[in-house]
């Protein structure tokens, strides 16, 4: 996967945060779980944008920033799933399946991001600066 795609993903994460805030206001800060998700969305988006552009921030090389963005993205899903399950067992089977699925997929992303941060090869990322979309 080319590194530039992570900058696009991070940009979309920031757009989602801005659009959600513009449409629904800032009431999410009053809920600890929603506030945590907002912080993860912002920090993950910024980490993806910086890492995807090949920038070094806070002494972290781009690959580690991408890893932290992946952990943040997984954290959003994990918090969503755990939040749904901790509010009581969802009544319908579909709700329970969605909550468990969110928690499990979020956990998987956190593990992949952690492995990538440690230098693992869970994802092969091209470090070239070629454009991500080429003319054919």
Image (spheres, rainbow, N blue to C red):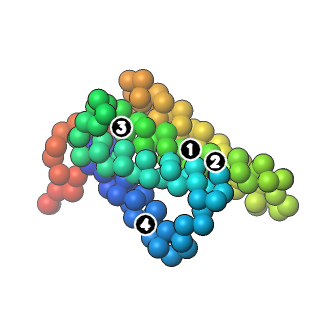
Residue 133 as seen in the image, left or right of residue 51:
left
CA separation in Å, label 3 and label 1: 15 Å
**SS assignment at label 3:** helix
Could you say which quadrant of the image residue 103 lies in? Answer: top right
Q: Which class describes the residues within 10 Å of circle 1: few (<14), some (14-19), or many (20+)?
A: many
* Disc 4: which residue: 18
Check contact, mark 4 vs mark 1: CB within 8 A.
no
Q: Nearer the viewer, residue 76 or 30?
A: 30
CA separation in Å, label 2 and label 3: 21 Å
CA separation in Å, label 3 and label 4: 21 Å
Q: Which class describes the residues within 10 Å of circle 2: few (<14), some (14-19), or many (20+)?
A: many
CA separation in Å, label 1 and label 2: 6 Å
Q: In this view, does 67 lie above or below 30?
A: above
* Disc 1: which residue: 75
Query: In the image as oriented, which residue stretches furthest toward the bottom?
Result: 23
Q: Which tag, 3 or 4, sits closer to the chain's start?
A: 4
Q: Which class describes the residues within 10 Å of circle 3: few (<14), some (14-19), or many (20+)?
A: many
Is residue 111 visible to us here?
yes
Check contact, mark 2 vs mark 3: CB within 8 A.
no
Q: Which tag, 4 or 1, sits closer to the chain's start?
A: 4
Check contact, mark 4 vs mark 2: CB within 8 A.
no
* Disc 2: which residue: 79
CA separation in Å, label 4 and label 2: 20 Å
Mark whose residue sits in front, 3 or 4: 4
Q: Which tag, 3 or 1, sits closer to the chain's start?
A: 3
How far from the left and from the top, in percent, is residue 132? 22, 52
Q: Which class describes the residues within 10 Å of circle 4: few (<14), some (14-19), or many (20+)?
A: few
Q: Which residue is drawn at 42% across and 57% down?
A: 13
């Amino acid at each position: 996967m080319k590194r530039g795609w992570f900058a696009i993903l991070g940009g979309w994460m920031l757009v989602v945060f801005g659009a959600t805030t513009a449409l629904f206001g800032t009431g999410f800060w009053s809920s600890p779980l929603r506030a945590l998700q907002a912080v993860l969305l912002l920090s993950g988006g910024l980490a993806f944008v910086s890492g995807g552009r090949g920038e070094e921030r806070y002494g972290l090389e781009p690959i580690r920033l991408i890893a932290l963005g992946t952990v943040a993205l997984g954290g959003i899903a994990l918090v969503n799933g755990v939040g749904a399950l901790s509010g009581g067992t969802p009544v319908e089977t579909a709700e329970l399946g969605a909550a468990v699925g969110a928690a499990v997929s979020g956990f998987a992303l956190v593990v992949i991001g952690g492995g990538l941060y440690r230098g693992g090869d869970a994802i092969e990322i091209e470090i070239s600066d070629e454009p991500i979309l080429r003319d054919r």
